Amino acid sequence: MSENVTSVKWFGMAIQALVVMASNEGLCPSGQLAEKLNSKSVFLRKILRHLVKEELIQAKEGRDGGYYLVKKPEDIKLSDVYEAMRSETFPKGFFDVESKECFAPCTRESMGELRDEMESWVVSGLEQKTIKDLMKS
């Protein structure tokens, strides 16, 4: 990923944008999406670029352009979105145990292993949910 994702806010905004796109027919211009999500268009377009790159959505450029889902909402797992938004282990900075003064090497290693295990729990849970699961019936 060329641009570092700096917070879980990106993941949440990506999920919301996908739900809005899934709820609308046709193209969703970034300005319209940003307005519905109470976000800035520039910020949202950064997020949408990651979703395009991972082929969850497509963008149509131009005056009448916008974004649309490539897959059905029931085929987009939340883990796919998480992977599209992720640049570092979730959550960034969690169990940052670089301090050699405070922790022995084995403790730092154990905390790193716990962090990795926690991420696998998150991804496993997200594998069970889709965008469709988040939409109103």
Image: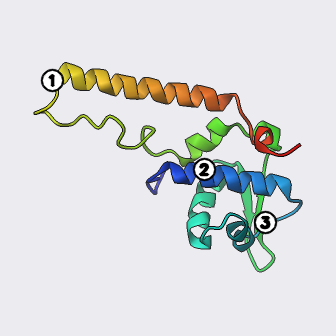
Q: Secondary structure under badge 3?
A: loop
Q: Nearer the viewer, residue 119 or 4?
A: 119
Q: CA distance from mark 1 to mark 2?
A: 36 Å
Residue 134, horizontal then vertical, whole percent = 76, 42
Question: Which tag is nearer the camera, tag 2 or tag 3?
Answer: 2
Instruction: Give the left or right position of residue 116, taking residue 127 as reference.
Output: left
Question: Relative to residue 44, is residue 32 drawn left or right?
Answer: right
- Judged left or right of residue 124, residue 21 is right
Residue 111 as seen in the image, left or right of residue 39: left
The type of residue carrying mark 3 is Cys
Cα separation, mark 1 vs mark 3, equals 52 Å
In the rendered structure, find residue 28 and report the number of the disc placed on it: 3
Who's the residue at 69% across and 28% down the image?
A: 128
Looking at the image, is mark 1 or mark 3 nearer the viewer? 1
Q: Which mark is residue 132?
A: none
Local secondary structure at mark 1: loop
* Disc 2 secondary structure class: helix
Residue at the disc numbered 2: 12
| Amino acid beneath label 1 | Ala
31 up-or-down from 47: above or below:
below
Q: Residue at x 59, y 58 (%)?
A: 47
Relative to 115, residue 135 above or below: below
**Label 3: how many Cα within 10 Å (few below 14, some 14–19, many 20+):** many
10 Å neighbourhood of mark 2: few (<14), some, or many (≥20)?
Answer: few
Three-letter code for the amino acid on which mark 2 is drawn? Gly
Read off the residue under disc 1: 104
